[in-house]
Image (spheres, rainbow, N blue to C red):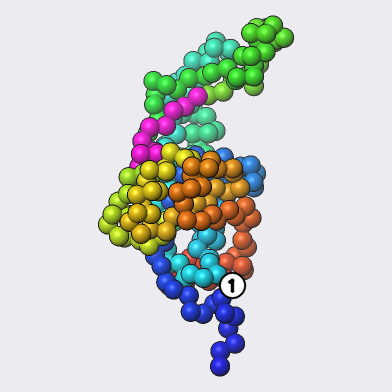
Amino acid sequence: MTDLPIERIDKHEIKTAILVDGGFYKTRAQYLWGTKTPAERAEELRNYCFSLLWSKYEKRNLYRIFYYDCPPSSKKVYHPLLDKTTDLGKSDVYKWQTVFLNELRSKRKFALRLGELSDEATRYMMNYDSMKSLLRGTTQVGDLAEKDFRLDIVQKGVDMRIGVDITYLALKKQVDQIILISGDSDFVPAAKLARREGIDMILAPMGATIKDNLHEHIDGLANKTVLPSHKQQTATGTDPLEPTC
């Protein structure tokens, strides 16, 4: 007679792909767990993804983790307040993102899907609140500081790649389940198609509020905001060194 807890036996096996909206993940991770080095953030992402594989009722076998993002910009951008050109290729952001992507490339079961940045749309923009204050006259031009401006960078092809991969995985029957780390309702059409093809669509918004139309077209939420320890991972069978992964 086995003394295993009931949640550890008689689980049906399913093949799971995890798709990570990189921009979304980095923003939420910064909010939830603070600033980290590229290596620490990459390891954190790995641990978070593997924690999502644990289920009380399913034995989720990892197919692959797809990470979607853009390489950093090396463009030289004019700053209107400082009246000088900034070389983004020499910035701390460029160095951090370059190392971070390289860290992910070296991790088992990770596949990078990189879009590109729109150089034409890369510019420094005044923050909305600062602009509103300036137009109302509560702030003068001479009072503006660097904090009143932000670097506006437009990604191209990232959302499209996520949608295409969801569609491809579903139509080719490569997985039984997709866990999407995002909070963007732009993926609703792809999610609807995947569900029609019999794919179990799970959303992991990392504690972020999601729109009703996205709620309507998923099969469940994995809304974890706490990172597991390595000991917890091993106890729940989600350690990446185990054969099931």
The answer to whether residue 32 is left or right of residue 65 is right
Task: Answer above or below: position of 110 versus 92.
Answer: below
Is residue 158 in the magenta section?
yes
| Residue occupying the point 61% across, 47% down | 207
The answer to whether residue 243 is left or right of residue 83 is left
| Residue occupying the point 52% across, 19% down | 124
| Residue occupying the point 53% across, 40% down | 211
Q: Residue furthest left?
A: 172
Amino acid under label 1? Ala
Q: Residues within 10 Å of mark 1 (few under 14, many from 20)?
A: few
Give residue 61's quadrant in the image. bottom left
Give the x, y percent position of residue 148. 63, 19
Give the x, y percent position of residue 196. 35, 54
Q: Residue furthest right?
A: 138
Answer whether residue 170 is visible to the viewer in this image: yes
Query: Dot 1 lies on which element?
Result: helix
| Residue occupying the point 27% across, 57% down | 172
